[in-house]
Image: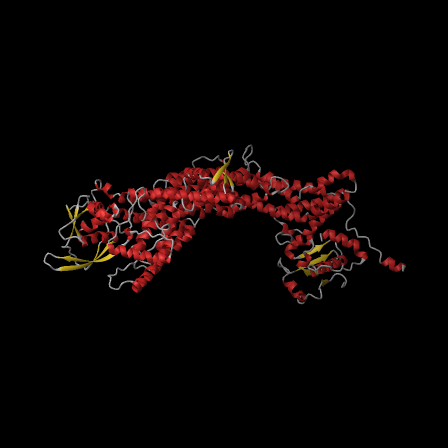
Amino acid sequence: MWHGPPSRHVYKPVEDRRLRDLHASTRTSMASTISEYVTLVSCDGFEFIIPRSAACVSGTIRRMLDPSSKFSEAITGRCTLETLTGIVLEKVCEYLLFNEKHKDQANVSDMDIPPELCLELLMAADYLDT
Amino acid sequence: MAAMRARNKIRAPRRGFPSAKTDDFESSWKVLSASLTEINTKNASALSFEEIYRSAYRIVLMMRGDDLYENVKSLEEDWLRNNIQQQVTESISTSLIRPQGVVEMQDQSNERRAAGEKFLSVLKERWEDHQLCMGMITDVLMYMVSGSIATRAGRRSNSPSQDRIISADRTKPSIYVVAMALFRDHVLRAAVRAESETTVYDILESTILFMVQLERNGHIIERPLIRHCIQMLEGLYENMDEEEGAKLYHSMFEPAFLRTSTKFYQGEGKRLLEIGDASTFCRITSQRIAEEQERCRYVLASATETKILHILDDELIRKNIEEVVKLEGTGVRHMLDHNQLDGLRNVYQLNARVDPKKDALVRAINKRIVELGKEINASALTSSQGQALSGKSAEEPKKTEKSKEKPVNQQTVSAIQWVDDILALKRQFDTIWENAFSSDQGLESSIMGSFSDFININPRSSEYLSLFFDENLKKGIKGKTENEVDALLDNGITLLRYIKDKDLFETYYKKHLSRRLLMKRASSMDAERQMISKMKLEVGNQFTQRIEHMFKDMTVSEDLSASYKAHIAQNADPDQKRIDLEINVLTSTMWPMEMMASKEGQVQLPCTFPKEIESLKQSFEKFYLGKHSGRKLSWQAGMGTADIRATFRRASGKTQRYELNVSTYALVILSLFNDLPDSESYTYEEIQGRTSIPEHDLIRNLQSLAVAPKTRVLKKEPMSKDVKPTDRFFFNNEFQSQFVKVRIGVVSGGSNKAENQDQRKDTEKKLAEERGSTIEAALVRIMKQRKKLIHSQLMTEVLAQLSARFVPDVNMVKRRIESLIDREYLERVGEEPPTYGYVA
């Protein structure tokens, strides 16, 4: 999944068919505040485009994007997260979508977390209020 | 393996920022404070949330969360004090600060209104901005609020010595709450002008109240504006705990609002009373209620609705309803008289708000019903005593003349008029009850109660009602459909429900019914039966038992007459001139006794029948006793009629035959003259001696035979209206009539009429006797069941048992108990409390 810096990635769950023509739709609706997708940018320049609903699992991102506040993130739909590296942010996005997919289910098996990322993910979770 | 382990080694998190330094805090705070000011001035779109958030995050990681908290607080405080407060106070014009005079001039109030609106809108804007900004700031400082305090508290809990600080930390209100409190203290509670006691809040309160007052006076105000200010008060709290009751709205504004409302409606109530129109009062009050409801819903808070309505109920309705109901000329009485259903409905609804029993209304209605009822009673009385009136009312000479002629008949008419009047009144109140009082049950029973009251005031109500039935069953229902008859009887039954002394009614009804049955005046047996089943439904089985038995006697007698006829046809001597006999055998206990029995004290000799009749009588007795042995027949000539063929020899020698329908007594009298030469006569005393007809009946029969102008079969000397013992009677051969069949009625005996005073006394006396035995029966019944009972309990049970029939006199019951003890049915078994026992 990781294609080297700095490039643009669509984090695309296989089962989500709505994401097929995603590139076009994200580009056109970039300017509007209430687009269906948002862009998360890591400190080292990786971009992840994920559904807004998934991103808003994070309290920090949700507040960042709250349309009633007039911050630049809310207006552009683009959040630059200066504290997270691309590797961590990728895992974060994976978790966000994983959470979104299984949100109404019980007994979901744990997500695979590589041990070497553990601490950094913990920090990220604290930061993102997830 | 070692390589693998090395590769899987957990990587230490990369420290994004160098370790904490004081100048780092300062620089981060610089970034933050600049950003917060930007937010306050609504320039947030240039800012990156992430950047501010990161700064706060960093500060908190530096363990400087508390400093951040305090810094933000003082920043906001400065902002509010230096900018917002000024803007708000500037918007307050002097006209708002001026203490309010009692009398407001129109232009002044307009000026004040404009100033108020300006002030409110500025305040509202500032408030909304503040809310929005604080929302954003809270979001940005989220890490401080949720993360820092909680995690720091967790970290510190390792050392028990610092427990106190932890708890202090935990109770630290969120920055949002603090900022709201700052707004309250530095904007709302700020003095309007330097060295002035009045605060912005005071102005706010008085302005809103002023607006509400304007709206109450019919002006249109800007509701959304006020609504927003109210919302602000609802969003601010007295303290940091944010309890429901501590909202500024509840703690400060609402009481003030309720106070001024109370004052306003006190004045309003007085003003409306002074107008003195009940329907206006009700209309405006209903309007006010609706207005206040709406105002609470759309302008103020819905929680206030019940409170303000309570004030309305108290001030406007409860204190005034009594007066309104009584208002001369427009009050409830006027509405009742003029059938103003809308007005009554309003009064009802208002009264229902403050009093589930609607006392004021009920009292007024009851009073009016009893008044109207008494009028009806009085008019029935005056018209029944037409003669007493004759001297006074010169306007109706004709009527008084008539009533002189037939005073008794007049009474009957007035009795029926009385019933009709009451029914009309009842109908009127039924309509009102249905349409204006939404069929309220309590009101129904109280209306019924008042009807019952005035009906029972009239001592002759039972008699009048029975006369009403009698009249209708005799003539009234001819040519009416079944439904009409049904409705008519139902109406009568409704009145029967109100009558307390049902036994008195029964007595009269039986008397009138027996006349109808024996004289064949009932126009429809179906209607009679219907009537009885209705009475049974209304009053109960026991009540109609005897009446039903009377009907049974009638049918049995019909069969008996037929079988006797057949028996005679078989056995009797065919040559003998036969007399047809139609007989009614009546069970003496079931029929009204006074018609048959003699007057008490005198032994009444049976009437002497002419020999033809006597033999007929004996023949029937033989026949009847042969069928039912052990019975005793007593003959009641007073109720019978006879068809006789009379031959009149004219002076010219011609003969003229007439068929006369006369009473049995008249038959007996006339047959005396069969054996008498034309020129001779009987005196009154002779007739009485030969026939032994009771004096009263004899006089009446002689009057109808010799005095009534159209049926003068006998001649009387001297010719006068009254019959005196010395009068002589001749057979009148000159009798003329244009019909062959002549009906000779008995004077004032034929139809049911209202009783005169003597008869009334008689009836009452009989009634008292009957009641005595009924009471005794009830006493014995109860005691047999209970064996032993305290006096007071016995009394209540007796009263309860008898109340369906009549309201017994307590002294009478006591006397009956004494008498039962004397006769050893009961015994005294205890003195304290007095107790009786049943003697088996």
Q: Residue furthest left?
A: B652
- Count numbered badges in the picture: 0
Q: Quadrant of residue B642?
A: bottom left
Vertical order, B718 against A67 (above or below)? above
The N terminus of chain A sits in image quarter:
bottom right
Left or right for B14, reference B145: right
Pinpoint residue B419: horizontal percent, then vertical percent.
Answer: 33, 49
Pinpoint residue B619: horizontal percent, then vertical percent.
Answer: 30, 57
Pinpoint residue B235: horizontal percent, then vertical percent.
Answer: 59, 44
Pinpoint residue A111: horizontal percent, then vertical percent.
Answer: 76, 59
Q: Residue furthest right?
A: B2
Vertical order, A71 against B808 (above or below)? below
Of B301 and B222, the residue lying toward us: B301
**Scheme of colours in the image:** secondary structure
Of B215 and B389, the residue lying toward us: B389
Residue B308 in sight here: yes
Left or right for B770, reference B94: left
Of A71 and B242, the residue lying toward us: B242
Residue B106 in sight here: no
Of B410 and B732, the residue lying toward us: B732
Query: Which residue is located at x 10 percent, y 56 percent?
Result: B651
Left or right for A7, reference B510: right
